[in-house]
Image: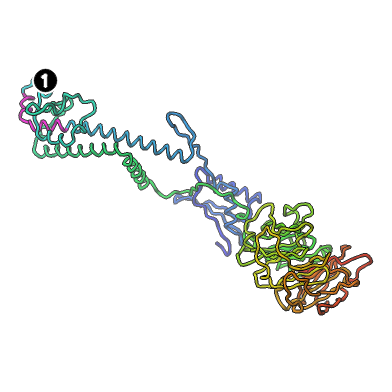
Amino acid sequence: GKGERQAIIIDELPYQVNKANLLIKIGELVRDKKLEGISEIRDESDKSGMRAVIELKRGENADVILNKLYKDTQLQDSFGINMVAIIDGQPKLLNLKQVIDAFLRHRREVVTRRTLFELRKARERGHILEGLAVALSNVDEIIALIKAAPTPADAKRGLMGRSWRSSLVEDMLSRVSDAARPEGLLPEFGLVGEGKTRGYFLSDAQAQAILELRLQRLTGLEQDKIVGEYREVMDKISDLLDILAKPQRVTQIIGDELAAVKAQFGDKRRSEIITHTQEMSMEDLIAPEDVVVTLSHGGYMKAQKLDEYRAQKRGGRGKQAASTKEDDFVDNLFIANTHNHILCFSNRGRVYWLKVYEVPQGSRISRGKPIVNLLPLEDGEMINAVLPVSEFVEDKYVFFATADGTVKKTPLAQFANPRTKGIIAIALDEGDFLIGVALTDGKHDVMLFSNEGKAVRFDENDVRAMGRDTRGVRGMNLAKGGKVISLLVAEDENQSVLTATENGYGKRTTITEYTRHGRGTQGMIAIQTSARNGKVVAATLVNADDEIMLIGTNGVLIRTRVKEIREMSRATQGVTLINLGKGDKLAGLSRIAEPEEE
């Protein structure tokens, strides 16, 4: 094609599909914008054969457009066959196996009847040749008899009215016995009697053949031909009788004749025919491409083509994007292929599957669509974590944490079979709920933070891999009333943990201050939960150049840079993160995945 342009070439059509009508239909779909990506349709058919060219626009995916043509036009078609056959004199609708069985029974009958016909003809020919052989053995007498007869009828009666001796015929008949005798031949004809009275009586057909015999057939060479043909006919009769006696020979003949038909007429099929068609999935109609998927704190989800997203970032539209959604912000952003899956985990421990192409496309300034509208969630069910997955490989794990301190690790491969209504990913005790999910590779430390200001860090391999519908093991030992509020996976020792309390205080502590403890312990102090601070409401991993959003219970959002929060040791009270009004509390904080442009 020209540049990146491609074309779809059509050089064959399904049975009974009209080319002109097909091209008109494609043109209508393009005109009605039901089929996009096509720039031109040309009919280049000539005497050498059929050829239609569908030019695509630059950058379009030819496979996707071809699948749409298969789905919406007769470029791919099904051809129904009403298989009715006459069985035992009655028309009957048959399936494919029954049709083949009926065909084989029909062929067996045809071969048998044909063999019987050939046997009858061979016997009749052998009978005539016997008469000619008798005449050749008695040629002088027969010529004299015919010459003396006043009429042909008298000559025929003379030939039939006496017995004839022929050692040649007697010898041949001794080898084939009655197998060569024509059906319906009266017993007085043929070789009759014993000893000296034994002789051959000619039938009407034999006598007529002798009378019609040309004189040149009486030469020695012609006599040898008659004897040779007679022997061939006898061999054929033996073979035909063997076919009738052995069903396996009939089967072999049917197979050989089918092979001969295939060899003679089995040219290459011009239209591909397959036994069944698979229903075209939505994925077949979607081009595989990388997109940026964002999920806002308020639960709005959208996707944007990666090149468009980068272009808008370069164009400095970040501030515009932020200003249009002051009551919300993006706290989850990832790049994924349109054919990838997104695993969505709810507070009730269920997992739902979402294809990336199912995420609504949006511009940089659009909010997207509530994720609850994309999934079949129950009343009160919320999505607490989303994980983009390109492949469900064996060496990766899904790590879970619940509010009551339970943790579980399940191989990612166990989530490879999507279910429309979702399935249980972790079994929960009464009153417990899922607070976090992470994707791990078995080589990282896991950190749990409680609302009581405690944190525990342990090797993820302290938790053995378990199946989906299981409860897990103790990850953190909580005091009465305590809840786990955050699950973090330590990726980099240069990161910091940002903790925040309900009264607006918080601090940034380097991750190296959180040393490993055993799984299931109370852990260490992460931040003091004094009367000034109140309960811990959030803990998240940050880098110095990140931005965070502080969320008040009154709905106020305060955006700030991590570098403006001083690093402090673990067992301290922290500093003021946000000045709260009377009666207001800090509901949480989140690292902003889509920072503002400078």
Which quadrant holds the C terminus? bottom right
Q: Secondary structure at mark 1?
A: helix
Q: Main secondary structure of the magenta part?
A: helix
- Among the 4 quarters of the image, the one containing residue 383: bottom right
Which quadrant holds the N terminus? bottom right
- Among the 4 quarters of the image, the one containing residue 224: top left
Question: Residue 152, image x and y in percent?
Answer: 12, 22
Nearest the camera: 73 or 344? 344
Q: Is residue 585 left or right of residue 450?
A: right
Residue appearing at x 8%, y 27% in the figure? 142
Residue 375 visible in this rendered orientation of the protein: yes
31 to 155, vertically: above or below:
below
Question: Residue 193, image x and y in percent?
Answer: 12, 26
The residue carrying mark 1 is 154
Magenta part of the chain: 129-147
- What's under tag 1, amino acid-wise? Asp
Residue 216 visible in this rendered orientation of the protein: no
Q: Is residue 160 left or right of residue 107?
A: left
Question: Residue 274, image x and y in percent?
Answer: 50, 48
